[in-house]
Image (tube, helix red, strand yellow):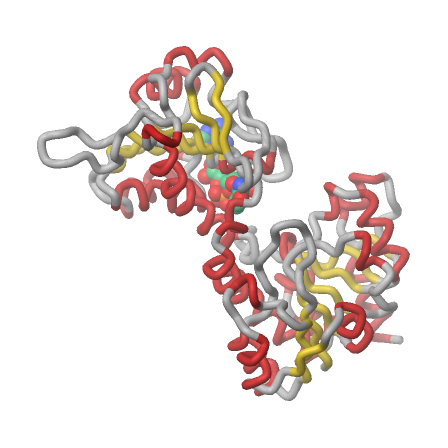
Amino acid sequence: MIIGVPKEIKNNENRVALTPAGAAEFRKNGHKVYVQATAGQGSGFEDSEYEAVGATILGTIEEVYAIAEMIVKVKEPIASEYGLIKENQLLFTYFHFASSEELTHAMLKSNSVCLAYETVEKVDRSLPLLVPMSEVAGRMAIQEGAKYLEKPMGGRGILLGGVAGVKPANVLVLGGGIVGAQSAKMAAGLGANVTIVDINLNRLRYLEDILPANVDTVMSNEYNIRDLVKSADLIVGAVLIPGAKAPHLVTRDMLKLMKKGTVLVDVAVDQGGCIETCKPTTHEDPIYEIDGIVHYCVANMPGAVPYTSTLALTNATLPYAIQLANKGWQKACTLNEDLKKGLNVVNGKVVYKAVADAFGLKFTSVEEVLEEELVG
Ligand SMILES: NC(=O)c1ccc[n+]([C@@H]2O[C@H](COP(=O)([O-])OP(=O)(O)OC[C@H]3O[C@@H](n4cnc5c(N)ncnc54)[C@H](O)[C@@H]3O)[C@@H](O)[C@H]2O)c1
């Protein structure tokens, strides 16, 4: 198969969908790889590194779309790319269709095959292509929180780990999923006193078992959170209710209970945030203050560490991408249920129920489309 890797053109996106190691893997499997010039640069990979493993560098994005049977990307195509997408072309990337009617219609019109990273799903309902970014954001939350706790950055001026004779900081983590567990682990590693809250008792039992002794687990409810925010120096929001807006666990009035200079990092801001006073910010202007409380609410945290994020993402996407290239999407999706769940739009049909429901569009089952394709 012919694989195309365009340079990401969304604002401030420095990740790339394929590393030189990934290109080598495609070559080993007998595929041709075309990479747009400087596509890997933002993540630290030079064109020469792709060429060294047998990939061809193309000067323009138009050339990449024109030659490729499968496009691997990171972010959803933006308007200037819509016209470049060809009929039957396979696009493997994050789409987040339900949040963009314009994108959905553009991809329907293109008659391409859109396999979305975010809906590839394992039998245990985990989302293997979202997990790596949650891991990155969870770890980063503590790094950013520690930075903004410094006095010159607007924080309380407290060191997370304290020193001999001085108590460490208190870190409260709301939600003990992927993001929360990684945050708790990092904060504990730095020596902070960590409390993690969740509504899932089994999850708390698991976290209690695997996390170090300076992490306490507490049942999530308003009473406990209201009490915990009083002593917290850093609060990380990491709650997710799949498919729904995050609940506001920290309400506006709770800010008054906090110490001045407390830092709030709401990682869940991309789902509306679990801290009522959070609104999305960017890496250029990441924080703001309300009632003396510092709010950090960057919606694409992994974007700040493209080297780590690219490797983490491609470690997870590559095995699927290789299957798609080796077998073709029709066979690969028939044989692999995880991949089948990733199909969202196929040749002008919406095959993912939540996307059809979001915009009142006709829904066609994946099985129906696959049968047509395999018979045809
Ligand atoms: N800002 C960013 O750059 C960025 C990056 C990655 C992920 N995220 C977001 O971070 C959030 C968390 O992602 P995740 O992968 O950890 O999800 P996850 O599903 O692994 O974990 C969510 C946890 O929240 C818990 N929860 C649900 N309701 C709760 C409540 N009322 N109180 C306490 N806990 C509750 C769940 O039991 C679960 O353990 C998501 O909104 C995700 O989109 C943001």
Q: Residue at x 88, y 47 (%)?
A: 362
Q: How many marks?
A: 0
Q: Residue at x 70, y 52 (%)?
A: 95
Q: Is residue 232 above or below residue 126?
A: above
Q: Quadrant of the N terminus?
A: bottom right
Q: Is residue 358 left or right of residue 207?
A: right
Counting from the top left corner in percent of width and height, residue 298 is at 54, 38
**Residue 53 seen from this side:** yes
Q: Is residue 182 above or below residue 64?
A: above
Counting from the top left corner in percent of width and height, residue 113 is at 79, 64
Q: Quadrant of the C terminus?
A: bottom right
Residue nearest the observer in this picture, 306 or 115: 306
Q: Residue at x 86, y 53 (%)?
A: 106
Residue nearest the observer in this picture, 215 or 264: 264
Farthest left residue in view: 165
Counting from the top left corner in percent of width and height, residue 227 is at 34, 16
Farthest front residue in view: 152
**Residue 172 seen from this side:** no
Q: Residue at x 36, y 27 (%)?
A: 155
Q: Is residue 342 left or right of residue 295?
A: right
Residue nearest the observer in this picture, 109 or 340: 109
Q: Is residue 287 left or right of residue 116?
A: left
In the rendered image, which quarter is residue 365 located in? Answer: bottom right
Counting from the top left corner in percent of width and height, residue 46 is at 55, 73
Q: Is residue 37 left or right of residue 256?
A: right
Q: Is residue 178 above or below residue 16?
A: above
Q: Is residue 147 above or below residue 258?
A: below
In the rendered image, which quarter is residue 93 located in? Answer: bottom right
